[in-house]
Amino acid sequence: MNALINLSQLDLQVPKGYFISEDKLTSLWTEAIPELVGLEATNQPSLPTYETIVQRLDQLSFPAELHKEISDLISPNKTYIVRSSGLMEDQASTSFAGQYDTIANCTTNDNIIAALKQCIASLFKPASLNYWQTQQLDIQNLKMSVIIQEQISAVSSGVAFTLNPLTNNDRLLTLEVVEGAGEQLVSGLVTPEHLTIDWFSTIGLTDGSKILSSDQLNQLRKQLLLIATFYGYPIDVEFCFSKDSLFFLQARPITTIRRKIDEGNWTTTNFRDGGVSAQPCPGLMWSLYRESWQTTLEKFLIQNKLYDSTNINQLSINHFARPYWNIGIVKEAMSRIPGYIEREFDDELGVYKNYQGDGYKSKLSVKTLSHLITVAIKINKTTQQQQQTAAKQHKQLLETYQSIDKKIQSLSSATDQQDIEELWETIINDAYLQSEQTYFWQVYVNTVQLSMKKTALLKKLPLDTFFQLISKLGTVSHIQPLQDLYEIVEIIVTNDTFKQEWMMNSPVDINTLLTKQPHRLDALRIEAFQETFGYHSNRELNLLVPSYSENQLLVVDLLKDYVDHPEKLTTAQRSFSQTLTDEQMEKLIEPYVTKWQRTKVMKDIKMLRELLWWREEFKDVSTRFYHLVRQITLKLGARYSQLGYIDQTEDLFYLEKETLHSFMTNQLSQESLQKSVQDNRIYCQAYRHFVPPGDLMETSASPEIENLLVDKQFYLAGIGANDGIVSGKVRILLDPKDIHQLQAGEILVTRFTDTGWSHAFGSIKGLITETGGILCHASIVAREFGIPTIVCATNATENLKTGMTVTMNGTTGDITIHKGGC
């Protein structure tokens, strides 16, 4: 109901109305139903019959002040409608919509009071109560709010969804329209006209409906997109036309979004934890990822005999403004690898499982043996080549990065536009692609080798020992900026003058002070940090977020948090680990393997450790090249903005690289370029507050399997990603901008972590995420800090609350909530 207040802020037409909140309305009727007073949340009340409740409400007197408020609202000769909305109507797991009464054609104060009582009574209709009890909802949820609204004389009415709720088409408005008032649609008395409208296509005279004109449809399309971008998530809207005026009557989020998709099986795993699917992905970033993923994965599958055809289908899609990759094809390929078990593969990546048991297992038979051996030989050869060339590739990429970085820094206002465009094309099509393909290749090698080696190793070694053996990898590049930050903090807190200034001033004032005194030690060290690690940012893989090199204040903010909370620094410094030596590894495996097995086990462990280490190194290089992409795009955007091609510098980030290339080569008009910017910006804005399903599938799990997959008790479990058992207080965080709220020694619980979270890992006691896998970046970094980690803990951010005390087992994935909660 509050949504209508927000819609009026958008200058959309909303009928004049009066809102009664759940709590206020409940206070009006509790006297009539004393059976509900004083009950515990989980109690099932013994209620009188619906007819008895109606009689009691009829005899109930509402306060005089409510009568006066309603009298002040209504005007003579106008008609009003009383709309109800249950507290649980807009929830993800419940669907009360349409079960409660809405009463139209009220003209007097008495009519409206009677309608209010009818709405309240509808809470207790047998069908509504049965659904409420079936869902095992708490007694406190037996509430509703009501809006008394001026009734519009509607020529036509309808309901609109800003996506297609049946197919999950995320750029398709879906409408049901009837002539006259919308109550006919809700009641099911008439068959509505069903319409779908493309978000970005203008409706022509011959494309429309039998009820609404093309002008009305275009007006509706524009205003629905305005609503979607305002809220940032899918919306369900009731509307009506009074002659040619469009009114919005009700708006609420579409909370039940299925995993269903028309074709293929897709996932954001790794993309989400890596950062590119952590938030809406604008056009440039999406087009970069799409090409590098497609070309590298195609080559890997074909070269290693993991796919028969050389014509591989699309391997990524952009859905809900997030990149998804084709896990269906990848699983088909993985099934050809010796030792492949679908559940273990899904566990390692954190993929939703719509099956019971282990799923598909690669089987040895006379028919498959030859091919499995061929695949194993090919993959081992690919792995050996990658190990042999990794150092050389790494060195060449760093040299390329440094060369291009100097070229970008040399650009000025006097540089010819064509030179900037040519450098942009070189970085995008050559340098970036080479870097990202190298990184992805390393990821694929790691994934298949872990699948091949882990099963065999776990037949000999306990899981907690396995985790210990793949941690303490050594000097991982993503840890080095953190160490440097901590050293700068030490310089600040051990100097009395610096410490006093940093503690007494805001980050902005400190930044001003450092700018005025650039030769003081803390300023010099921050400058050196920006030069060395300036390619990092708070939201890596988001090209819209400034790198540390662009703004000293970003670094000051990080340092200030540690200066103000020295306990975080102390905890973090204890967390850094040394490289695991051969002697330590041999000691770990000694109790579980025989002497003749030891050599083979050590060889496999060393190979996995080396692959994991190189994965992080190439990820660091990838981060450097995304920094270059951002810097050159800012230069080009500034020039285009100056010339009037675009409105602002950042517009270029909303263009796919192919679109920008077409403009550069005079194949696309300036008008089309600007429309592409506008369309992609709307698309990203419309899903910016939406948490989409992590996996999209052709077939969802049956209700029976869903019940087995979801544990509704106060006990959670996920997948262990690093060993250790710890107890501590929970801190729920959903966005890196809130990371300063994290206290030393707390257990961080979040949906997923992208690389921008890493700097906080040193001060936490444990990590729990709803997604991710044991090979994701967060798990690898957490193991370097020695933090017990659990991934794939479904709904952890909802079932756990900040301040709760839990015990987590990073080996088994078990999470136990302590009684008493906080």
Image (tube, rainbow, N blue to C red):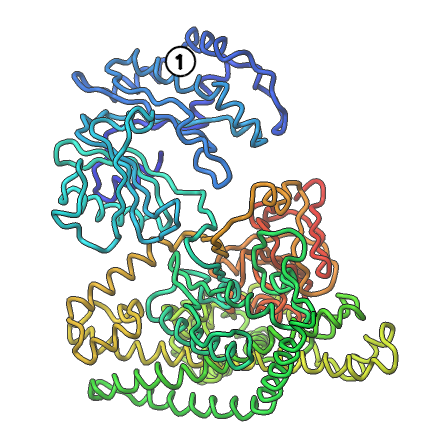
Q: Does residue 517 appear in this view?
A: yes
- Where residue 6 appears, as percent x and y from the top left, is 30, 41
Image height of 482 relative to 129, above or below: below
- Where residue 784 appears, as percent x and y from the top left, is 66, 73
Which is more toward the observer, 31 or 503? 31
- Classify residue 153 by image quadrant: top left
- Classify residue 660 by image quadrant: bottom left
Residue located at (60% from left, 61% from top): 346
Image height of 793 relative to 318, above or below: above
Q: Is residue 215 left or right of residue 315?
A: left
- Where residue 627 appears, as percent x and y from the top left, is 40, 78
Q: Quadrant of the N terminus?
A: top left
SS class, disc 1: loop
Q: Does residue 560 appear in this view?
A: no
Residue located at (70% from left, 70% from top): 364
Residue that protrudes farthest toward the front in the picture: 366
Residue bearing the label numbered 1:
62
Number of numbered discs visible in the structure rendering: 1
Residue type at mark 1? Answer: Phe
Q: Residues within 10 Å of mark 1 (few under 14, many from 20)?
A: few
- Where residue 632 appears, as percent x and y from the top left, is 32, 80
Image height of 793 relative to 658, above or below: above
Q: Quadrant of the C terminus?
A: top right
Image height of 134 relative to 118, above or below: below
